[in-house]
Amino acid sequence: MRIIALSAAIPLALVLGATAKADQSGRDTGSLPATTRSIIDSRPSQPVAPTGPGSASPEAPSASSHVLVPSIVQSILFDDNIYATRRNKTSDFAYVVRPDLSFAASGANYGFQANAFAERRQYFEQTRESQTNAGASLGGTYQFTPDSQLQARASYLRGHEERGSGEEAFFRTDRPTAFNQFDGAVALNNRYGPLWTSLGLAGLYVNYENPKIGGVTIDQSYRDGGISVANGRVGYVVAPLTSVFVEVAGNRRDFKEDYFSSDGYRVVGGVLLEPGPGARVKGEAWGGFMRQTYKGATLSNISSFTYGGSLSFLVTNDLTFTVEGRREAKESGLNGGVSLIESYGGGRLDYQLMPNLFVGGGVTYLVDSFKNADRRDHYWSPLASLKYVASKNITLGLEYRRLAFHTDDPLSSQFQRNVALASVTARF
């Protein structure tokens, strides 16, 4: 049986569905991609090129500024089922330390952000599960003219596959499988009065190390591969900070074992809500049609509807709501190779109880529908968090996530997993 596990890197902060990025007051600022993501999100999604109207941001500063923020997070983690098994569960504590360095610079016609982190997760008893992760990213925007801008980003992530996610539902290695992931994107955005256009390119590449199963080294080189996307949008501004758009995007999923490679496209329409003064909703949502054509004989071509997006709502001055979702065609090593449709949705509420006390809660849900395999995998994951800002430099946190996995395949194992985290974050 051929097995391919196209798993994205997941640092510890995402195990619990990390809270959104927060400013120094502790308020979650609605950085949506981190608000609801969890270990269930394992196979890499298509990289996305930044797109927008290309107009000067109403919040652009008139003078240059530079901010450097070093920080360190120290945590104690408890996992009651670290191997994600149905029976004979193994629980353990882990000590986690994560130094982080962030830098931001901005001026009248540019903005730049960079971040780097390293993370050590050391289990008390099950030391084979211990791991070291690291990553770095940078991105920015340059405004050529008030109506023309260039956006770009690049990132690197060294991580390990999480137990119980994606292809890990089919087999278990002796130790978590390590991998390196590279991601990059660039987009050129232009505005012509109320009309705007955006052209973008994005790419992602994953390289896996060879793990062991029962002490035997397993060659994982066939899992190495990349995803490239080219997209174009045409939008129209219908109200301040609000646009409708249509998009055509083509993708190539290209793996070392060409059997799993595919080509595809999507045609969608949507709405884009820009940040700015007085904006209470930001983000985008879209829907339409997708098609993916696979090379392998056992991988069915997919023609179906698709959707995606992420939105952040400032419901009141004390309450924020974030929601995201997507529907994509992917591939799996199940039964020697099958295609699948992955549907994902998640939402989160964060409420400021007191000036320095925040509570949050939410849920994520993911379904993998495998073609020609008579199988559907379901992941439910509620979460809760509590954050106390002791000072402008110290933040205390408690987080809890429950992950429940169920599959229609009677021969596969179900499992439930509870993870709790207590953390102290120090900013300098």
Image: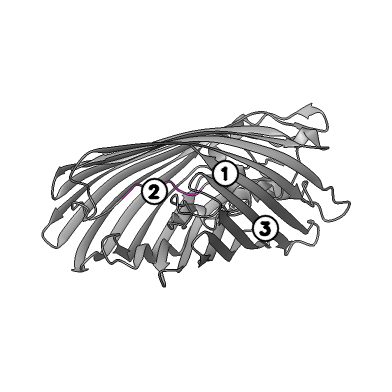
Q: What element carries label 3?
A: strand
The residue lying toward the viewer, choosing from 341 and 92, is: 92
Q: Residue furthest right?
A: 88
Q: Return the residue at label 1.
A: 425
Q: Do the residues labelled 2 and 3 touch (CB within 8 Å)?
A: no
Whole-angstrom CA distance, mark 2 to mark 1, is 30 Å
The residue lying toward the viewer, choosing from 124 and 143, is: 124
Amino acid on which the number 3 mark rests in the picture: Tyr
Q: Is residue 60 above or below residue 359?
A: above
**Left or right of 218, for residue 142:** left
Q: Nearer the viewer, mark 3 or mark 1?
A: 1
Q: Residues within 10 Å of mark 2 (few under 14, many from 20)?
A: many
Please give the name of the residue rendered at 61% of the width and 29% of the height, measured from the top-left corner.
221
Estimate the x, y position of residue 35 in percent, counting from the top left.
51, 56
Colour scheme of the rendered structure: one colour
Please give the name of the residue rendered at 45% of the width and 49% of the height, measured from the top-left corner.
24
Whole-angstrom CA distance, mark 3 to mark 1, is 17 Å
Range of magenta residues:
45-50
